[in-house]
């Protein structure tokens, strides 16, 4: 049985009250706020039975108002990068705000992570809803998005649903940063990771996929068998992993499948991820630098955590050879990702 409770987390002047929901099962407690659907805390048991909070975050609302690294947030309308912030739909060109080098990242200047969502209680969890108006951040169509978090024993499921009044690109994900020892642990070098993927997307100097779908064989991106992250992160070109691993190739049916497993030998904690999405962005917190004031005084240096952002492939809206990125009127966008927490 999951116990669901809520309280006020804070008030944003001129915007309203932010709620905090707590989903508590025997083995896992998750906290979610209505600002950006942000997961602010996940407490799970280690092998010794001790609970630790294994996601990065801030102590209070003020921290989340300046959440430049998207800790725990739902990202939309389009997660990841759109090259030049430009795309064409139905013969019409759209230009979005540029907020990351020459590109648009994570939905633009005011993405879904910065909105207050309305909340409704559901069995074992909470459903959050956002109406993104036609023209929001430059995207076409009024989009109604819902994100449903449900905790059932050791599994947190996140269901993303949306419909739109005009054809629009869409790509929703959650941007939680994990460290399976504790959110305040200094690095993830002692974590073992596997990702069930035969191919990844190489990127250019602006982090846009080149278009090539490259096999992982014989490269540092071959994570099909568990690898220790410390040595492996150093073998990857650039500051660490920040790449899309392909889970479904274009034209193949999208169905839920196991995609990643992370094991922390010292605590015994295991995180398993399954998703219906076509890809997963594996990001090793390369751009954190210890300058943030995190929960309980934590500082969050580079490589202190990892994200497994289940999503469609970056810049898919501009790459016809990538899986379809568009949601059309009358269609329903519907994806589920599950995080299962256990020990080994
Ligand atoms: C991206 C990183 C980016 C980070 C922002 C990730 O999803 O892949 O490149 O810096 O989000 O925190």
Image (cartoon, helix red, strand yellow):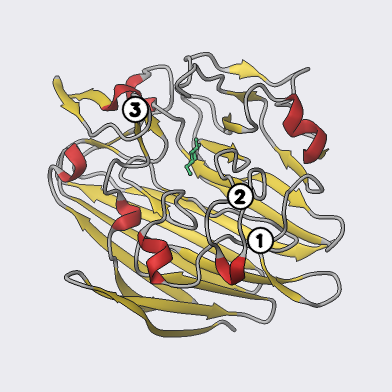
Query: Left or right: where does residue 47 sit relative to residue 341?
Result: right
Vertically, is 91 above or below 151? above
> At which x and y percent is residue 298?
62, 63
Crowd around label 3: few <14 · some 14–19 · many ≥20 (10 Å): many
Local SS, label 3: loop
Instruction: Specify the quadrant of the image occupied by residue 84.
Output: top left
Of residue 222 and residue 330, the one placed in the foreground of this image is: 222
Percent position of residue 164, x then y: 20, 46
Residue holding disc 3: 103
Which comes sooner in the sequence, label 2 or label 3?
A: 3
Q: Let me know if residue 123 appears in the view.
A: no
49 vs 289: above or below: below
Residue in the image at 46% along x and 25% along y: 251
Q: Which residue is mark 2?
A: 274
Above or below — where is 260 with respect to 33? above
Figure quadrant of the C terminus: bottom right
Q: Could you give the CA–CA distance between mark 2 and mark 1, rounded to whole angstroms?
A: 8 Å
Q: Residue beneath label 1, please?
A: 340
Q: Which numbered disc flags the more N-terminal residue, 2 or 1?
A: 2
Measured Cα–Cα span from mark 2 to mark 3: 29 Å
Q: Is the distance from the Cβ of mark 1 to the nearest ligand 1 atom less than 8 Å?
A: no
The label nearer to you, 2 versus 3, is: 3
Circles 2, 1 touching at the beta carbon (< 8 Å):
yes
């Amino acid at each position: 049985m999951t116990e669901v409770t809520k309280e006020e987390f804070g008030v944003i002047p001129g915007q309203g009250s932010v709620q905090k929901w707590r989903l508590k099962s025997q083995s896992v407690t998750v906290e979610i706020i209505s600002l950006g659907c942000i997961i602010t805390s996940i407490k799970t048991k280690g092998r010794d039975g001790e609970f630790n909070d294994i996601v990065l975050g801030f102590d209070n609302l003020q921290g989340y108002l300046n959440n430049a690294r998207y800790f725990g947030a739902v990202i939309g309308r389009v997660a990841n990068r759109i090259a030049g912030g430009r795309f064409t739909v139905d013969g019409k060109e759209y230009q979005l705000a540029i907020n990351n080098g020459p590109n648009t990242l994570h939905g633009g200047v005011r993405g879904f992570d910065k909105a207050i969502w309305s909340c409704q209680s559901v069995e074992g969890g909470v459903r959050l809803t956002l109406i993104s108006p036609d023209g929001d951040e430059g995207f076409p169509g009024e989009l109604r998005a819902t994100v449903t978090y449900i905790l059932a024993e050791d599994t947190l499921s996140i269901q993303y649903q949306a419909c739109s009044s005009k054809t629009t690109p869409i790509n929703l994900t959650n941007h939680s940063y994990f460290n399976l020892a504790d959110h305040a642990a200094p690095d993830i070098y002692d974590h073992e990771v596997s990702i069930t993927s035969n191919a990844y997307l190489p990127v250019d100097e602006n982090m846009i996929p080149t278009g090539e779908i490259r096999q992982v064989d014989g490269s540092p991106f071959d994570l099909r068998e568990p690898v220790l992250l410390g040595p492996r992160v150093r073998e990857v070109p650039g500051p660490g992993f920040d790449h899309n691993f392909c889970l479904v190739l274009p034209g193949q049916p999208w169905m839920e499948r196991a995609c990643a497993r992370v094991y922390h030998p010292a605590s015994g904690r295991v995180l398993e991820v399954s998703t219906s999405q076509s890809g997963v962005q594996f990001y090793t917190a390369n751009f954190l630098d210890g300058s943030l004031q995190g929960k309980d005084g934590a500082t969050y240096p580079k490589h202190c955590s990892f994200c497994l952002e289940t999503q469609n492939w970056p810049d898919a809206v501009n790459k016809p050879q990538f899986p379809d990125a568009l949601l059309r009127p009358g269609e329903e966008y519907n994806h589920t990702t599950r995080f299962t927490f256990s020990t080994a």
